[in-house]
Image (tube, rainbow, N blue to C red):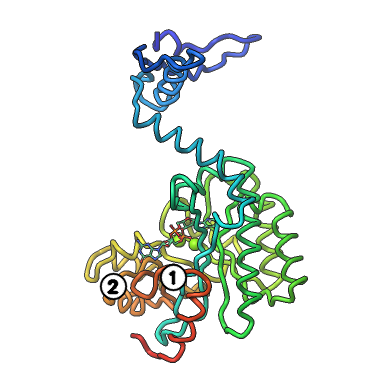
């Protein structure tokens, strides 16, 4: 059957390629539910998975199905989370300057405590939300919460970065809201940074670039997040009005001193510095990694070794305590 379905189907003289997958689901007693359609749902789930397999056929797998159900449940409850006032929150993770050890900025990271499932990691729910219209509301929520933190910490000298996705910048709405809120709350744009990750999913690169330029012209710094993974490359870097490059933690972790990886990272940091970017090292977990980041020429570090992400009130205390200390490295 799979072979037969490989041949294009003719539709008004246009050969259309079919995207068939064959799901095999045993019909058992467990399939008997109220509407009698459970066996069908299982077969469709198996067919969906089979489409991504080389043989294009496969058995129903309860684990895969459970993951899909969880994804569905998360998306279905995210709209409710946006309305509630106690499910979503921002945690702040300090970013320290090298070599002084002074905290000059922090990254705002979204946290979600689901009423039934407990804490759900952003790495799980953000990619799901990105496929839906909910991402726009989620990003606005994060932006407003971040500005609230800045409005309550006018006496503290630090800037706050938050993560935006390409989708947020594919139209003017998000940037309009950000620039308007900054002005309305009299927050200096220099206290805000946007962390942006390139993705192949960018559908309107021109528009995204336009929105990043608006941010840049307003005085908001742009950081390229997760540099060294995925799709980040130099050509792309030179097109974006970014001033900061954040080295992904996978790069930092692989580059133990004396290895070829370390030489590569050192060269990358050197090149970025020569091009005028400030380089930040993410995911610093040990003193050795901190010393190494400093030796590479990174001017900023972030990671569990320095501090874990924490609620805004705790960050304020941490900030007061730590600013007394100088010269960590
Ligand atoms: P990211 O922007 O690269 O954020 C850094 C992630 O690394 C955070 O994970 C942080 O908790 C974690 N991290 C920091 N230091 C260390 C370390 O020393 N070791 C290890 N193993 N991890 C460390 P988190 O908070 O789970 O966020 C994961 C990703 O989810 C973020 O990666 C970002 O891409 C996304 N994300 C988080 N909050 C938001 C948000 O508000 N909006 C958007 N669009 N994405 C967000
Ligand atoms: Mg980030
Ligand atoms: Mg990152």
Residue 96 image position (x, y, % from top left)? 44, 79
Residue 267 image position (x, y, % from top left)? 36, 69
Q: CA distance from mark 2 to mark 1?
A: 25 Å
Q: Residue at x 33, y 65 (%)?
A: 252
Q: Quadrant of residue 302?
A: bottom left
> What is the secondary structure assignment of the residue under circle 1?
helix
Q: Nearer the viewer, residue 312 or 303?
A: 312
Q: Quadrant of the C terminus?
A: bottom left
User: Is 281 placed above or below 86 here?
Assistant: below
Residue 56 image position (x, y, % from top left)? 38, 20
Quickly name the residue at label 1: 271
Q: Quadrant of residue 16?
A: top right
Residue 135 image position (x, y, % from top left)? 60, 48
Q: Is residue 58 left or right of residue 180?
A: left
User: Is 71 placed above or below 120 here?
Assistant: above
**Residue farthest left in this picture:** 258
> What is the secondary structure assignment of the residue under circle 2?
loop
Q: Quadrant of residue 3?
A: top left
User: Is 265 placed above or below 32 here?
Assistant: below
Q: Nearer the viewer, residue 107 or 120?
A: 120
Q: Residue at x 66, y 63 (%)?
A: 144
Q: Is residue 254 left or right of residue 316?
A: left
Disc number at residue 286?
A: 2
């Amino acid at each position: 059957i799979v072979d037969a379905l490989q041949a294009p189907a003719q539709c008004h003289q246009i050969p259309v390629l079919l995207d068939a997958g064959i799901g095999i689901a045993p019909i058992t007693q467990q399939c008997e539910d109220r509407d009698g359609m459970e066996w069908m749902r299982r077969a469709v789930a198996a067919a969906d998975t089979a489409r991504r397999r080389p043989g294009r056929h496969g058995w129903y797998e309860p684990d895969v199905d459970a993951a899909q159900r969880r994804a569905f449940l998360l998306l279905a409850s995210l709209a409710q989370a946006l309305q509630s006032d106690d499910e979503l929150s921002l945690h702040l993770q300090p970013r320290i300057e090298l070599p002084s050890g002074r905290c000059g900025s922090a990254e705002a990271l979204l946290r979600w405590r689901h009423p039934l499932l407990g804490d759900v990691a952003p790495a799980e729910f953000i990619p799901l939300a990105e496929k839906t219209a909910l991402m726009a509301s989620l990003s606005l929520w994060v932006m407003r919460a971040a500005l609230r933190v800045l409005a309550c910490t006018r006496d503290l000298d630090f800037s706050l970065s938050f993560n935006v996705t390409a989708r947020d910048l594919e139209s003017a709405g998000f940037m309009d809201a950000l620039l308007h809120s900054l002005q309305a709350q009299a927050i200096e744009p220099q206290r805000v940074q946007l962390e942006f990750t390139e993705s192949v999913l960018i559908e309107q690169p021109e528009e995204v670039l336009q929105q990043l330029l608006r941010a840049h012209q307003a005085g908001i710094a742009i950081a390229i997040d997760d540099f060294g993974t995925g799709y980040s490359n130099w050509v792309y870097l030179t097109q974006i009005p970014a001033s900061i490059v954040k080295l992904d933690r996978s790069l930092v972790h692989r580059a133990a001193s004396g290895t070829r990886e370390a030489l590569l990272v050192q060269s990358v940091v050197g090149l970025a510095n020569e091009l005028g970017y400030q380089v930040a090292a993410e995911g610093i977990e040990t003193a050795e990694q901190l010393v190494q980041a400093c030796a590479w020429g990174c001017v900023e570090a972030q990671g569990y070794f320095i501090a874990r992400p924490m609620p805004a009130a705790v960050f304020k205390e941490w900030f007061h305590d730590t600013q007394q200390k100088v010269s960590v490295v």
